[in-house]
Amino acid sequence: MKLTNTLTGQKEEFASQDPIKLYVCGVTPYDEAHIGHAMSYIIFDVIRRYLEFRGYRVRHVQNFTDVDDKLIARAQRLGASALQLADGFIASYFQDMDALNVQRAHVYPRVTEEIPSIVQLIQRLEERGYAYAVGGDVYFRVQRAEGYGKLSHRSLDGMMAGARVEVDEAKEHPMDFVLWKGVKPGEPQWESPWGPGRPGWHIECSAMAIKYLGESLDIHGGGQDLVFPHHENEAAQSEAATGVQPFARYWLHNGLLRLGEEKMSKSLGNLVTIKEVLSAHSADALRLFVLSSHYRNPLTYSDEALAGAERGADRLREALRPVPEPATGQPLDPAPFHQRFIDAMDDDFNTAQALAALFELAREANRVRETGSDVTQAQQALRELGGVLGLTLTQQEGDEGRQAAPFIQLLVQLRNDLRASKEYALADKIRDQLGELGVLLEDGPTGTTWRQKR
RNA sequence: GGCGACGUGGCCAAGUGGUUAAGGCGGGGGUCUGCAAAACCCCUAUCAGCGGUUCGAAUCCGCUCGUCGCCUCCA
């Protein structure tokens, strides 16, 4: 199995360890999760599912950064506490992830509940000469960190040349970053050896990862926008504190979702929330859309693309229709498709190629079932491998659908009586009008079936 | 300005040195059907441009053009 490691910039053989220690950077819960988040968490969900499919055990930890400037600012604007605001958006986040069929991590540590470990880690850095206090703040001493910039492949000099580095008199070096922020009026605060305050941005991930997974991780993941400064700083301070290298053996980063020609991001305000997408499209469609390109490449969102993905999802679902009569022909052997799926996924999680194998399996199953072949094994394989990609491939009928079912069935029977007596005009009218209500009728050789359109 | 990624059919998107350049969506034609729908079959590209390396390149190198990302909060 091979995967591309941001640290080396190379596609490397994945040297297995069991259980695999997987840390994925979570969200700052100050707003609804958007489809950029969906993309990232779908990708890491698939990576985890595939590792498990390949027989590894995976211990998956994902944080919530529930103290942060924007979270505090928003809470103050709304007259709520930061904690309340975070609680609400965390609940909403879990709703979204459940709806997307994203498996839950084993642990979801929250910054506000991990302050002691964070303080301890900063103390360790201070003892080892990597941190210094100025006023109530504590900074990380970037110049002392050997190899700083190795993850994002840039040098301190190169970054300084960017000229957008703000000069702060308090800091020894402009790139030094804050580990502990001294308290400001009206902000959440905790006691510490440096006075009351709260953690800086990057330190929480180090503290939580080390606490729940140990001093060296197998895989650390997140969006490409986190490579610098977040992951760079996380790696630097973790290695500085523990002396263990590397902090993470494999760094995996997904490409960013774009809307039009720009990245979708909170600061640009060009967001589409997960809830908005799921009100119009199925989770399978969103997953198919995300997985149809390679996870490291950027992807451009559009409603048309989602609609296309929905059609594709429909086709896979269709292939799973039950076979009514007992099949007599040669059973379809899914093994070659199974193997193609594995070969694709083993190669840096090439989900696009893996999906191609599934589509071809679906087509082959549809093709041979018409000649009476047994496709139950093929369907089982499609279901299983689809499941590895987190696809449910089921029609999600709402409560309305379930309640309307007997009435729809009644209309279908009535219409078939009309068809039997060749009253096609009326029969078509029933079909058309049900269609307008979102109910699709299909007359097959074995009878009429119906399903809901989205 | 520094670092990096990308440019493949109408759209999305795999492939990264050598059989007929995956797959999805869309479009066209057909089979099936009372008609549809679904399903299936057939058709729909020479890989941004230029130059080079090589027996051979979409795939390696250089240049040009274009797009995007990071360098500041961000999955």
Image: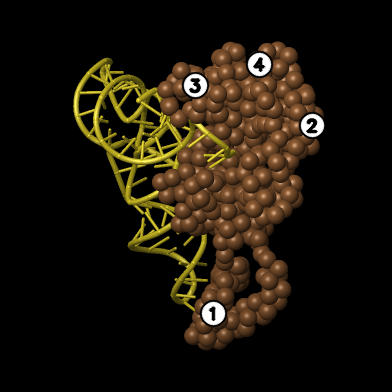
User: Looking at the rendering, in which quadrant would you find the C terminus of chain A?
Assistant: bottom right
Q: Position of residue A246 (x, y in %)?
A: 64, 17
- Say whether marks 3 and 2 touch (CB < 8 Å): no
Q: Which residue appears at 57% of the width and 75% of the height?
A: A437
Q: Are marks 4 and 2 on the same chain?
A: yes
Chain of the residue that carries numbered disc 2 in the rendered image: A
Q: CA distance from mark 2 to mark 1?
A: 67 Å
Query: What kind of residue is marked 2?
Result: Glu
Q: CA distance from mark 4 to mark 3?
A: 21 Å
Q: Colour of chain A?
A: brown
| Camera-side residue of A425 and A37 | A37
Q: Residue A433: which numbered mark, if any?
A: 1
Q: Which residue appears at 64% of the width and 35% of the height?
A: A25
Q: Which residue position holds label 3? A: A153
A270 w.r.t. B61: above or below: below
Q: Are marks 4 and 1 on the same chain?
A: yes
Query: What kind of residue is marked 1?
Result: Gln
**Secondary-structure class at tag 4:** loop
Mark 4: give few (<14), some (14-19) or many (20+) Cα within 10 Å: many
Mark 4 or mark 2: whose residue is earlier in sequence: 4
Q: Which residue position holds label 4? A: A130
Mark 1: give few (<14), some (14-19) or many (20+) Cα within 10 Å: few
Q: Which residue appears at 71% of the width and 44% of the height?
A: A186
As drawn, is A368 to the left or to the right of A132? left
Chain of the residue that carries numbered disc 4 in the rendered image: A
The image shows a total of numbered marks equal to 4
